[in-house]
Image (cartoon, helix red, strand yellow):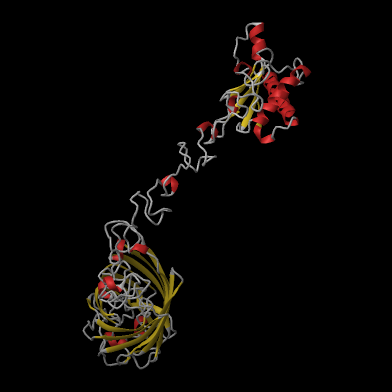
Amino acid sequence: MKHKRLLLLLAGCIGLTAFGQSPVKSFELEQLTLNPGARSNLLLSTGDLLPERSFRVSLVGHYQSQPLAVYNENDDKVGYIVDARTTGHVTMAISVARWLEIGAQVPYVFSQTGDADPGRDGSIQAVGKKGLGTPYFQFRFGILSEYYGDVIDLGLHLGASLPLGSEKALTKDLDYGFNPRIGIGRSLGDYFRLGAEVGALFRTKQVLTETAIESEVGNYMTAGLVLSSTNEGLRFELGGRAFIPLVDAPLAGEAFAGLRWGLPNNVFEIFAMGAKGFGKNPGTPNWRVLGGIAVSTPGLPPCIEGKPYEIASCPDLDKDGDGVKNGVDQCPDVAGPAENNGCPDTDADGDGVVDRLDKCPDVPGLPEYDGCPPPDTDGDGIPDNEDECPYEPGPASNKGCPIKDSDGDGIPDDEDACPNEPGIPELKGCPDKDTDGDGIPDRFDSCPFQPGPPENNGCPKKSAITITKERLVISDKVYFNTGKATIQKRSNVLLNDIARVIKEHPEIPKVVIEGHTDSTGKYETNLKLSERRAEAVRTYLLKKGVEKDRLEAKGFGPDRPIESNDTAAGRETNRRVEFVIVQPADKVETAE
């Protein structure tokens, strides 16, 4: 029969006698070992351990297709001793120190099928449907760790398997197995990590049949490479593993891809992975898928300055950078001097002098007075450091010095133009003189150097100019050609007299020449005409020797009538030029 001509790789293990072989004990078919810590990778041990004092527990469902095939004399695949296997894995890992992680995994085969189904001729002996898999324990030693500040991850993995599985289900080796591995890994920027491992599995050699080729199981070397992402949330990993037998058996390998999704804080994680197998080595499936859920704790953060860590766990670091170590710093999150046991200085009065150096901690002061306010010797409310007369009381407006009035006229010396002569405010403290002795003060005398009666405004003859505090009042008017800014010659005498009065009264600081019109005609035309007429008068007075900065011209057009524009007489009156005296503090109104 055809099945009697089969070369069974596992004939001895399953009890076939077609080749006249004595039955031998079973072996562990499964080549997959998970990574219980799974910090970066689900399968490979690439040198990175769990953080100190953290643990991880996971439940994994695992399905593999065609992990054990049967070949004939021509090396053609003709059947499957194990066609499908469903396994559950429990994995556990705990980091007892930053350099040591202990892990374990226990598999259990829940379902297993092959070609030896009921109704066949029995030439392939049926395997067990279920059974305990080989328990596996491991110790991982961290030599270098990126998590703790090294350039790369480098670790030594020492694992051991126990011969406690089921012979019939092909889940048990003859003896203990030993699995050493070296893992290395490094971050690539902020989002990726590249890892690799090399190792071996040492176990008892089994010769499955003397006549079949590639019929041994035993020791083999392993090598793997994986690229994984390191972001939060959804992550991926891509990689491959190679199996290099050290006995008479073919090479094999697998390419795998996985996804991992960590819930908030990564306490819970859901993961899934698929792999494609290559080669005829027993235990290498055509393909496999696995998925599961894990629960883990974060462990202790690393004691590295610049990275987050728990202060209580890192007493020799200095989180706030104040030179006081965390173990003795009473305020480890806030910088402070050693004199305050690492706590910041306080400044209750906010004067910039810390309380421990402030002799007046509740009153704002100055550093030069040890935090106390400066004294006020003369009691004028102005501290001595700002008082220009610290021994004489005076107002702040005078920088703490007393206000003096040397001539006793009620005008302070700093405002008195004649501080040594009593005067009046109108003349900035200078005396109200009457130069010509006619009884009319110079400031109101139209002829201050020639005596004259009051009815002549202090002039020997009748004057057309009366001086008041606000303006030069003229009894005549300035005449212009109709509609123009040309001054008629009959106004020259008046303007000459105005120029003389201004020059003889230096106490008049400025005169604004205001031009006004009636409302006849266009507004814009009248406004411009009033401006040109005022400027024409200013130009005339300048030619008569009046200083430029004492004269200003403004035009108001029809905006300021003094009589009604409804009558000819009113309109005549409104067409005028006025001379307004402006003191420095007065506001000059414009035409706008």
- The image shows residue 122 at horizontal and vertical percentages of 28, 79
Q: Is residue 279 visible?
A: no
Between residues 194 and 365, which one lies in front from this camera angle? Answer: 365
Location of residue 266 by image quarter: bottom left
Between residues 456 and 563, which one lies in front from this camera angle? Answer: 456
- The image shows residue 329 at horizontal and vertical percentages of 27, 72
Residue farthest right in this picture: 489
Q: Is residue 409 visible?
A: yes
- The image shows residue 586 at horizontal and vertical percentages of 54, 31
Image height of 306 relative to 365, above or below:
below
Between residues 391 and 70, which one lies in front from this camera angle? Answer: 391
Quarter of the image with the N terminus in it = bottom left
Image height of 165 relative to 512, above or below:
below
Location of residue 362 by image quarter: bottom left
Image height of 250 relative to 36, above or below:
below
Quarter of the image with the C terminus in it = top right
Could you tell me which residue is drawn at 46 percent across and 71 percent down? 189
Q: Is residue 52 left or right of residue 224?
A: left
